Amino acid sequence: MKKITFKSEFDTAIRSPKITVAVFKADWCPDCKFIDPFMPEVEEKFANDLDLIEVDVDHVGTVSEEQNIMGIPSFVAYVDGKELTRYVNKLRKSREEIEDFLQSAVEVYNKRL
């Protein structure tokens, strides 16, 4: 997963015509650390359908503020610079829930075509 370190990188990434899912997280977040071990496999599973980027809310804080990120980890799908859908809640996210969200983002995208 590509780590975003500048707002300009984020802006470029989400302007892609392919689905780009931003994973907003932080090093100190226990629920973010929980998803780290399985995210590479999840990313590989969806590699043909979307790109995943990591946005550290402490290092690229203006992005999280602009995107109304209130809790982490949060997943927001973008296409052509516009938000497609998001997955945010206060509960720890399981691999299955994340995969279900990514699949739903692909389905929402395909309905637009």
Image (cartoon, rainbow, N blue to C red):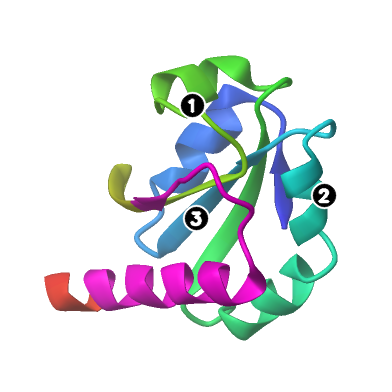
State which tag comes first along the sequence, 3 or 2.
3
Which one is earlier in the sequence, the residue at label 1 or at label 2?
Answer: 2
> Image quadrant of residue 6?
top right
Front one among 4 and 38: 38
Left or right: 20 in relation to 44: left
> Which residue is identified by label 2?
33
By secondary structure, the bulk of the magenta-drawn segment is best described as: helix
Q: Are marks 1 and 3 in contact (CB under 8 Å)?
A: no
Residue position marked by numbered label 3 in the rendering: 21
Q: Amino acid at mark 3?
A: Val
Q: Which of the 4 image quadrants contains residue 9? A: top right
Q: Which residue is mark 1?
A: 70
The stretch in magenta equals 86-109
Element type at mark 2:
helix
Question: Regarding mark 3 in the picture, which secondary structure is present there?
Answer: strand
What residue lies at 68% left-to-right and 80% top-to-bottom?
A: 44
Q: CA distance from mark 1 to mark 2?
A: 18 Å
Tell which residue pokes out farthest to the front in this image.
91
Q: Residue at x 43, y 45 (%)?
A: 14
Q: Percent position (x, y) of residue 22? A: 54, 48
